[in-house]
Amino acid sequence: MGDKMHIQSAFDRDLERIQASIMKMGGLVEEAILESARSLETRDEELAETVRRKDAQIDALEEQINQEAARVIALRAPTAVDLRLVLSVIKISSNLERIGDYAKNLAKRTAVLSRMAPVGDGSASLRRMGREVEVMLHDALDAFVQRDAGLARDVIARDVDIDQMYNALFREFLTHMMEDPRSISACMHLHFIAKNIERVGDHVTSIAEQVVFLVTGEKPDEGRRKAALPSLDETED
C-alpha cells in the first residue's frame, strides 16, 4: 500500500510540474503579445528585439513539456482522465508555441513601420484587437487552471469579435490603398499584422476548446466552422 501511495504521489507531482510549466509558458506568451503590440505602437525597435529573443524560451518550454508528458505516458500508465489532461497539455503547449511565433512575427514589423507614415487610425484598431486576444488568452489559461468549461466556451464565442475586427480593418486598408496608392506598402504591412493577430485568436480558441474537452470529455461543437476571411496575400506563415 505504501509503494502504491508513493507512486501516486510521484505521479501527482509530475502532473503538477507539467501544469506549472504550461502556466509559465502561458505567462511568457501573454507578455510576448503585449510587448510586441507595444513595440509596434511606440515603434520601439529595442523592445521588438527583446520579444524576438525571448521566443527561444517559449520554444524550449514546449519541448520540455512534450518530453515530460511523454515520460508520464510511458512510465505512469495514467487513467483515462489523467491521460486526457496530459494530451490536453501537449495540445495547449503547441498552440502557445504558435502564438509566440506570431508575436515574434509582429515584433519583426516594428522596424519597417517605424520608417513609414501612419495610416488613418489603423494602429489604434490593431492595438484594440491585440488587447482583446491577450485578454482571451488570459481567460483561456484561467479556464484551464479552474477547469471552467463555461469560461472556455465564452472565450470560443469571442473569436467572432476578433474576426469582425479583422474584417473591418481589411476594408479600411483596401479603402486607403484605393484612395492613396502611396499607402499601399504601409497597408500591406498593417494587414500582415492584423492577419497575425486574427490567427492568434484562432490558436487561443483552440486552447479554450482543449479546456472544454479536458473538463467534459467532449469536444466542442464541430459545426463551428468560421468562414474564410479575406486576405491580401497568403504568405503570413
Image: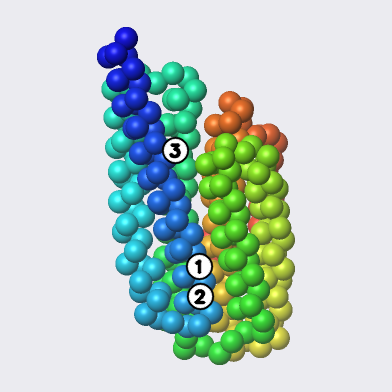
Q: Is residue 33 left or right of residue 2?
A: right
Question: Residue beneath label 3, please?
Answer: 89
Badge 1 amino acid: Leu
Per the rendering, the mark at residue 38 is: 2
Point 35% across, 74% down: residue: 49
Task: Find the distance from the CA under tag 1 to the CA under tag 3.
Answer: 23 Å
Point 53% across, 62% down: residue: 196
Badge 2 amino acid: Arg
Q: Residues within 10 Å of mark 1 (few under 14, many from 20)?
A: some
Q: Residues within 10 Å of mark 3 (few under 14, many from 20)?
A: many
> Is disc 3 in contact with disc 2, using a CB cutoff of under 8 Å?
no
Q: Secondary structure at mark 3?
A: helix
Task: Find the distance from the CA under tag 3 to the CA under tag 2.
Answer: 29 Å
Figure quadrant of residue 232: bottom right
> Is disc 2 in contact with disc 1, using a CB cutoff of under 8 Å?
yes
Q: Is residue 171 left or right of residue 106?
A: right
Q: Secondary structure at mark 2?
A: helix
Q: Secondary structure at mark 1?
A: helix
User: x, y percentage for residue 140?
Assistant: 57, 48
Question: Residue beneath label 1, please?
Answer: 34
